[in-house]
Amino acid sequence: MSRKTIRDIRNEEFIEATLHAVYERGYHSVTLSEIAQVVGATAASINYYFGSKDKLIEATMRRLLSVLRTALIERLHSATTPKERVQAILEANFDDRLFEMKQCSVWVQFWSAAPYSPDLARLQNINRARVRSHFRKELRQLVPHHQIETVRRVLQSYMDGVWLQAAQTNAPLNAANARTEALHVLDLLLINPDRAL
Amino acid sequence: MSRKTIRDIRNEEFIEATLHAVYERGYHSVTLSEIAQVVGATAASINYYFGSKDKLIEATMRRLLSVLRTALIERLHSATTPKERVQAILEANFDDRLFEMKQCSVWVQFWSAAPYSPDLARLQNINRARVRSHFRKELRQLVPHHQIETVRRVLQSYMDGVWLQAAQTNAPLNAANARTEALHVLDLLLINPDRAL
DNA sequence: ATTTTTTAAATGATCATTTAAAAAATTAAC
DNA sequence: GTTAATTTTTTAAATGATCATTTAAAAAAT
């Protein structure tokens, strides 16, 4: 029963094309024509569907966020203990569907552009707030009160850093490795916390 | 005896202005005129001194790298044990002269632009290779052979992530806190390594 | 005087966006 | 089921704005 309108299909195609073209050419030098070319259309067509280049970019960012949200919800759903749920957050961030060159690259570029675009900044804040709040809720049951924020900051910084590096490597990414390593880092932070933090 | 030519002074001014203007307006939307305005000059003047916008950007990136290199050398010089030297690398990355909004912001923007500019990419690789090699040399004496790369990757990812977040916060940065937290993370990685990694 | 530095204005290129018309698809009528 | 109207989608070309860069001349410094 998937009754997709042409509009939905085109939206989908153009967002996919944007991911590809931004990855290939860079956020600040890609043109509407280049994006349109990826799917054999014209720049005018994009404006017909999205209204402007900015709106297209915003829609693409929403797409990335939606992939992360989906992975996060799925994994949280099948976790039962606080620690499992923290692991779920970490693993969602390096989910196979997300932790892939094209998306890492575009994501990092959006990050760096966000401070200069209210729309992108808004989306980014929503996402960051969600991850932060999930972390806090679970860490409350795993580490002493006064260490919650430190542990959370370290985990989030670590995840961001891995993404940043992923976007700059030309070697193919290994999402499974990234997840394993992230779980190791978590274990380190949970070992004997009174001693180091 | 600091005999500075006008050329040196102007170079300095324009690089400073670039840091300011890129921070204010964003790497991909700042114009030569805006940069020139910061020091009351004209865009043509920048081309007279730097030859092109790209060269100015490259010179600004070099400036940032030079600040890091200086901090790194200074701190390494006064460290005597392997652990102190690893600490020196971490602390240099969050040196007061470097870990400051304007520079974090510009640095992150350069990072995200580097894959699309051979010149920026080259500079970035040189820098990353230097930090990597320092880490390796010292970690060899601190952790078992098979864990060197993992520990190093975690530390570098963590540092990158902190920078990324710093560039996106509007709260003022606290370099001393960043250094303290980084040393904590190091201690965690060095505690009982056989257990977790 | 001569050289260095600065600038206003010109140049030329690039784009996002608009427009107006064509093409395709959908609907309605017979 | 074919045809004619209507709506949706697409595009080529026009528009207008923005910039980096060049140029040629003026201003400042040596």
Image: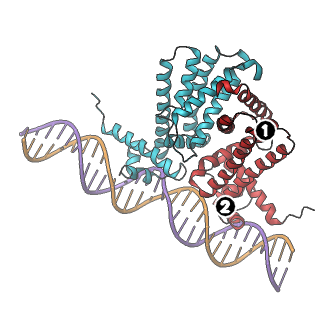
Chain colours: A cyan, B red, C purple, D orange
Question: Does mark 1 fall on the same chain as mark 2?
Answer: yes
Residue A99: image x %, image y %? Answer: 51, 36
Q: Quadrant of residue A160?
A: top right
Say above or below: B9 vs A101: below
- Which part of the image, by quadrant, shows the C terminus of chain B? top right
- Specify few, some or many for label 2: CA neighbours under 10 Å numbering under 14, 14-19, or 20 or more: some
Q: Which residue is mark 2?
A: B55
Amino acid carrying mark 1 in the image: Glu
Q: In the image, A178: left or right of B148?
A: left
User: Element under label 2?
Assistant: helix
Residue displayed at 90% across by 61% down: B2
Reading the image, the residue beneath label 1 is B91
Position in image of residue B152 (x %, y %): 68, 38
Name of the residue lying farthest toward the right: B1
> Local crowd at mark 1 within 10 Å, few (<14), some, or many (≥20)?
many
Give, as a three-letter code, the residue at label 2: Lys
The answer to whether residue C24 is above or below residue A195 is: below
Query: Which residue is painted at 68% across and 59% down in the image?
Result: B56
Count of numbered badges drawn on the protein = 2
